[in-house]
């Protein structure tokens, strides 16, 4: 056995837990394109959808497993013979707010179950989808966000803090399995994902779709506050590549940021979406809506992805103009199919 | 009904979850002394001990309930008719390291169960025992630690980070129950507790006992590193008073630090314990032991308790010299009874 945590894609089998999703389907395609012997998408379809994987489901090397991260038996069966496991299954902030019982089950015990199954079946490497939510929210989140940046939570909504802390715990469960059982892993801290087959459950990514829909209806898009608030998105294809490279690299026991090339202000984002939608009215500046979970940052920030380049050789390739163009082209071609 | 979250002690019934403990028994005595109609100690005796409550168990207004925070039925039965609930049940870092499954159950789902039972039985106020572990570990933890200080975790052991993050989640579950169900609560962020009937599961408090035992055996006490590392303890009687005042105060929906009057360096602590033990050899400076979870801080820090005075009118009264004197007097009187 080589003394490295590298797991080549070609000829190996991979399990994607929470696979019937935006990132799951894109990563499945990436791994299949690189010669994976099999990619199995494990999902309970609570949030995942048949639509998200419709383009893939007849692929001869793709398998769909209906299972639940809360059932060890499902995970033990699914991990058998797998060289790598990508753990994506999670509640995000909006769903955590609606159901903190289910969210804490999935984001903590679900991760623990998945790691235990990987250990029991000697899966060679786990890639865990963490989040820049591990840096938290509010005015403290400013400047360069690097992997040692602490977790700021003062004043943020409970569900957002619970989500961020659940991801911190998920990362540490990976570290604990590495220390106690030698399980190799890479944690990728995703920033907000957008792209083709965009889902409707991430508070920040949803904003792109809402803005686009308003412009297409001839309405003025809305900017909350003065529009100077920073967002830092990452294109789904870049993340699929990051997941693949995390398996392939010799790196283990490391957590790195995977963000897009550059942050964007809310106002720039709205203007860009409006332009790519074919033009429209000037944005309307509005106060914060009540009753809606919005995740605000204080000062300008930038998620630094240098460490990902050092650890797994990855950097983002798709900027906001190109990525949003692809999302919008998909959306325009698929609008009739949306619920 | 008065429009205040104040719950007077006299004539009311209180439940202490995780009650067969250092803080639980001291708080029970405090509430009974202030006229509580009943204090019920709820414990599964996984960590709690009969010894910790031996001095109380024949008290006519004290009741002992064998129950588990993982069983809703136990909690629903126990919370019935209670005006206040103190939630203490938790795994600390050392036990979290040994059993992260049990620790995450108790520290997260257990808190959720206790809050749900309190809501279902209309308990008027919950006091939740959080920790200064919500500020984390390592070099980032320096200077004045106030309630808005972020959570630093880089480089700390997995179990310590999991413990701190589990307390952050526990606090947010309280906030969530307040927002969604109007449940009044006060979070107290305890620093490391010491005092009579000291238990043997807190990494930092254990150091006091270990040092005392070495001195009594005529050995040189050990100082890890150069002895400049900060510790900030709180005397158990001060915490019992803080718990009582949190119930009595009109405050709700707030989290405050409850620490001792002043921090102490490791070297000062060892010298003070040696002096109070009747003198002994000079301390030995040693490197960090391998294989043992030790929680180190970086620079000097001080836990600021001003906010507790504003919110619940509390400040610590017992300094290290007095509190250690009481612990040692108890220890010398009880040495034969220790396991």
Image: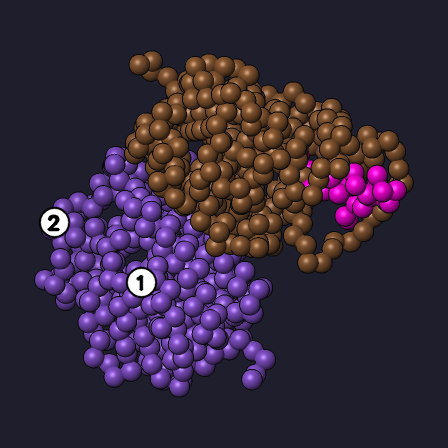
Chain colours: A purple, B brown
**A226 in relation to B56, above or below:** below
What subunit carries mark 2?
A
In the image, A233 versus B154, the foreground residue is B154
Viewed as shown, does residue B154 lie left or right of A173? right
Image spot of residue B247 (x, y percent): 46, 22
- Number of labelled discs? 2
Residue occupied by mark 2: A218
Asked if the residue at tag 2 contacts the one at tag 1, i.e. Cβ–Cβ closer than 8 Å, the answer is: no
Residue occupied by mark 1: A68
Viewed as shown, does residue A52 lie left or right of A167? left
**A10 in relation to B185, above or below:** below
Residue at x-position 44% and y-position 25%: B14
In the image, A234 versus A134, the foreground residue is A134
Q: On the image, which quarter does residue B81 sit in? A: top left
Residue B208 covered by magenta stretch: yes
Residue A287 covered by magenta stretch: no
- The mark closer to the camera, 1 or 2, is 1
Image spot of residue A117 (x, y percent): 43, 68
Q: Check the picture and name the quadrant holding the C terminus of chain B.
A: top right
Residue at x-position 22% and y-position 40%: A284
Query: Which residues fall within the magenta stretch?
Result: B206-232
What subunit carries mark 1?
A
Viewed as shown, does residue B70 lie left or right of B223? left
Label 2 element class? loop
Image spot of residue B28 (x, y percent): 53, 25
Residue at x-position 79% and y-position 38%: B212
Badge 1 density bin: few <14, some 14–19, many ≥20, Cα 10 Å = many
Residue B236 seen in render? yes
**B137 in relation to A55, above or below:** above
In the image, B320 versus B89, the foreground residue is B89
């Amino acid at each position: 056995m080589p003394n490295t945590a590298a797991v080549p894609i070609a000829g190996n089998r991979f399990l994607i837990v929470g696979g019937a999703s935006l990132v799951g389907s894109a990563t499945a395609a990436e791994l299949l394109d690189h010669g994976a012997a099999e990619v199995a998408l494990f999902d309970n379809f609570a949030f995942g959808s048949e639509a998200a994987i419709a383009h893939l489901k007849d692929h001869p090397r793709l398998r769909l497993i209906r299972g639940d991260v809360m059932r060890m038996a499902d995970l033990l069966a699914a991990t058998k013979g797998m060289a790598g496991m990508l753990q994506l299954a999670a509640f995000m902030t909006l769903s955590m707010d609606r159901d903190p019982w289910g969210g804490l089950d999935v984001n903590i015990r679900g991760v623990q179950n998945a790691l235990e199954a990987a250990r029991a079946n000697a899966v060679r490497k786990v890639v865990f989808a963490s989040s820049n939510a591990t840096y938290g929210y509010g005015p403290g989140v400013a400047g360069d966000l690097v992997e040692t940046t602490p977790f700021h939570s003062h004043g943020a909504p409970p569900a957002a803090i619970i989500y961020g802390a659940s991801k911190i715990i998920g990362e540490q469960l990976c570290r604990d399995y590495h220390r106690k059982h030698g399980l190799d892993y890479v944690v990728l801290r995703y920033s907000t994902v957008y792209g083709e087959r965009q889902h409707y459950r991430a508070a920040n990514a949803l904003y792109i779709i809402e803005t686009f829909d308003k412009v297409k209806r001839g309405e003025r898009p809305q900017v909350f506050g003065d529009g100077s608030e920073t967002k830092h998105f990452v294109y789904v294809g870049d993340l699929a590549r990051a997941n693949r490279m995390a398996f392939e690299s010799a790196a283990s026991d490391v957590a790195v940021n995977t963000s897009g090339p550059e942050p964007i202000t809310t106002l720039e984002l709205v203007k860009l979406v409006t332009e790519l939608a074919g033009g429209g009215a000037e944005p309307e500046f509005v106060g914060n809506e009540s009753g809606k979970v919005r995740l605000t940052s204080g000062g300008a920030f930038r998620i630094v992805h240098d460490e990902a380049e050092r650890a797994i050789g990855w950097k983002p390739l798709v900027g906001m103009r190109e990525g949003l163009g692809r999302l919008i082209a998909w959306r325009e071609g698929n609008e009739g199919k949306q619920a």
